Image: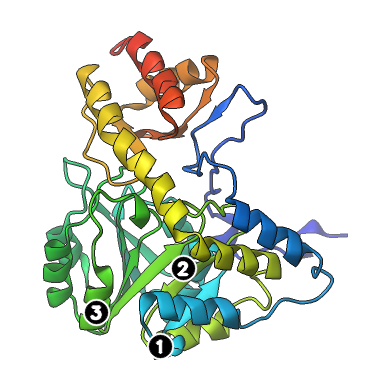
């Protein structure tokens, strides 16, 4: 058999860079700080809902996730036709790019940002237009505006930005949206919104600008990373396109039940996020005292900018201490915030680390 004649994936797929997930802990003494997961166990109501829903896994879930959509519509005070639910916010974003972009269209985003952005663009055949971050690790909005051309279909804003943790101010967002052509969809990825030091009323912007889409997830503050539930708030035409392009039954009944229970536990979710919010300035200040230029973060992690040689040594130092962190080739290291004791383990590693060697 001639191997040349066998089926192969598209060239664009074969050329895709692999998505590098955070490493998983292999023991109870290992601190898993590589994936920005919640360090808390699932909430009691969530566990109860998962247990009850597990007895129905022999049945297909509701493809429309109607109960969850209705609840999200009530929580966000939007119409039911403005909501699309999918398997995590990255699953919804994949649908968005696929629904809006033809081959050769442009998607503009800051870089470095969420690692999945260029991968999703390449899968769709769209051009990934990376705009470098500012020196303070924030979005360069004027440069992003300049990158918009007649080919641009989507602009992605990640706030707080993953992996740098920097957030966009509401006034800056509004000023940016005023200048973006209305034919371009601006997607605000708010995966870490619950960890902001101030609550931004992005819903007000959503109601004001018809080309704004809000992308949210249950993976981070709600602690459902393993169940994959996310959603988009968008104008009815966009939301309908997302529902049409969704893989059938991609949100399980277990995931939907858990998300509903998490929404019912909003006070507990906020209390857990508040612990991280309170710890963040303490940790950032301590890291700065050790000589690192840590940006002001608005998420459940902090960012250490460094070159590759130092990055490799730093990741190795954390590994030796039983702390898993996330390294980014060419850019730096991201460390998830956890409870005070675990954060102190992180600070101890950084205090012992010798910078500028190798």
1 and 2 marks in contact (CB < 8 Å): no
Asked if residue 290 is positioned above or below residue 3 in the image, the reply reads above
CA distance for labels 2 and 3: 21 Å
Give the labeled residue for mark 3: 150
x, y percentage for residue 147?
A: 20, 65
x, y percentage for residue 144?
A: 20, 62
Between label 3 and label 1, give the one nearer the viewer: 1
Between label 2 and label 3, give the one nearer the viewer: 2
Give the labeled residue for mark 2: 93
Relative to residue 124, is residue 286 drawn left or right? left
| Secondary structure of the residue carrying numbered label 3 | loop
3 and 1 marks in contact (CB < 8 Å): no
Residue drawn at point x = 17 percent, y = 41 percent: 136
Residue drawn at point x = 46 percent, y = 75 percent: 72
Number of the label disc, if any, that sits on residue 79: 1
Residue drawn at point x = 21 percent, y = 56 percent: 168
Q: How is the image coloured?
A: rainbow
Q: Earlier in the sequence, mark 2 or mark 3?
A: 2
| Secondary structure of the residue carrying numbered label 2 | helix
């Amino acid at each position: 058999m001639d191997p040349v004649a066998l089926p192969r994936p598209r060239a664009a797929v074969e050329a895709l860079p692999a998505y590098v997930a955070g490493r998983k802990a292999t023991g109870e003494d290992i601190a898993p700080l590589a994936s920005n997961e919640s360090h808390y166990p699932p909430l009691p109501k969530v566990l109860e809902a998962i247990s009850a829903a597990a007895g129905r896994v022999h049945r297909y879930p509701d493809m429309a996730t109607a109960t969850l959509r209705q609840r999200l519509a009530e929580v966000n005070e939007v119409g039911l036709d403005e909501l699309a639910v999918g398997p995590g916010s990255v699953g919804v974003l994949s649908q968005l790019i696929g629904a809006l972009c033809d081959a050769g269209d442009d998607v503009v985003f800051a870089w470095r940002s969420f690692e999945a952005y260029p991968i999703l663009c390449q899968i769709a055949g769209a051009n990934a237009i990376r705009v470098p971050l500012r020196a303070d690790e924030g979005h360069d909005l004027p440069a992003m505006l300049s990158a918009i051309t007649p080919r641009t279909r989507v602009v992605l804003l990640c706030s707080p930005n993953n992996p740098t943790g920097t957030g966009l101010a509401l006034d800056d967002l509004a000023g940016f949206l005023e200048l973006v052509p209305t034919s371009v969809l601006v997607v605000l990825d708010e995966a870490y919104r619950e960890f902001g030091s101030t609550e931004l009323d992005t819903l007000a912007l959503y109601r004001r600008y018809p080309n704004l889409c809000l992308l949210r997830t249950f993976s981070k503050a709600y602690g459902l990373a393993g169940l994959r539930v996310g959603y988009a708030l968008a104008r009815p035409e966009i939301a309908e396109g997302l529902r049409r392009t969704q893989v059938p039954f991609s949100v399980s009944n277990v995931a939907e039940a858990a998300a509903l229970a998490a929404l019912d536990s909003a006070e507990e979710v906020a209390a857990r996020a508040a612990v991280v919010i309170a710890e963040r300035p303490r940790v950032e200040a301590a890291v700065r005292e050790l000589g690192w230029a840590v940006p002001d973060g608005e998420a459940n992690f902090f960012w250490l900018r460094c070159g590759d040689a130092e990055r490799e040594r730093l990741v190795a130092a954390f590994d030796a201490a039983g702390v898993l962190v996330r390294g980014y080739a060419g850019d730096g290291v991201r460390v998830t915030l956890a409870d005070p004791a675990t954060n102190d383990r992180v600070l101890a590693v950084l205090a012992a680390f010798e910078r500028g060697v190798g």
